[in-house]
Amino acid sequence: MRNKVDWLVKLGEVEWSRFTYARAEGDPLRLLGSVRRGAQLGALAMTADERYVQVVGDFVSPLPNGEISRALARARRLQPYEPYVRPRPAASTAPAPVVTVKRRRVFVAV
């Protein structure tokens, strides 16, 4: 029986967008997906010098490259990476609904 808890990696924008925001074009972080080990979870990213890091908001913490690369290979076998493209909302031809808020009746004592 193994006592060691393995890293769980899931790929795609849907996964990393739960933990951090999209980075600017020149940012050295490349977001890959999400990573989890027990209660430790966050977005998985790769730095410019090809080190894996965990990102939660703006907080970046290093991860063990060997273990993460094995978990990433396992995730790619199980779930091939396909960039997530957000579906565009269908153009509605119906006019916008009009909402009327009725004034409340106020009792005035004479």
Image (spheres, grey):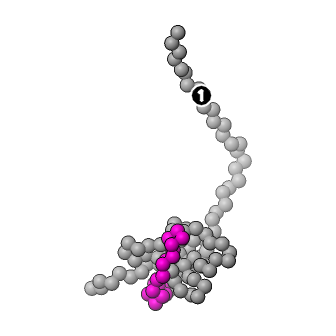
Residue 30: give x, y in percent of width and height.
60, 79
Q: Residues within 10 Å of mark 1 (few under 14, many from 20)?
A: few
Residue 75: give x, y in percent of width and height.
48, 81
- What residue appears at the point 58 percent right and 67 percent down from the top-left corner? 21
**The N terminus sits in image quarter:** bottom left
- What residue appears at the point 62 percent right and 80 percent down from the top-left corner? 28
Q: Amino acid at mark 1?
A: Lys
**What residue range appears in magenta?**
54-72
Q: Is residue 65 magenta?
A: yes
In the picture provided, is 69 more to the left or to the right than 22? left
Res. 18 in view: yes
Relative to 95, does residue 16 appear above or below in the rendering? below
In the picture provided, is 32 more to the left or to the right than 88? left
In the picture provided, is 47 more to the left or to the right than 66? right
Res. 79 in view: no
Q: In the figure, residue 46 lies in which quadrant? A: bottom right
Q: Nearer the viewer, residue 1 or 54?
A: 54
Relative to 81, does residue 109 appear above or below in the rendering? above
Q: In the figure, residue 32 lies in which quadrant? A: bottom right
Q: Residue furthest left?
A: 1
Q: Is residue 45 magenta?
A: no
- What residue appears at the point 57 percent right and 83 percent down from the top-left corner? 47
In the picture provided, is 108 more to the left or to the right than 90? left
- What residue appears at the point 57 percent right and 87 percent down from the top-left corner? 50
Q: Nearer the viewer, residue 54 or 96?
A: 54
Relative to 19, does residue 45 appear above or below in the rendering? below
Q: Which residue is mark 1?
A: 102
Say what secondary structure mark 1 lies in.
loop
Q: Nearer the viewer, residue 55 or 33?
A: 55
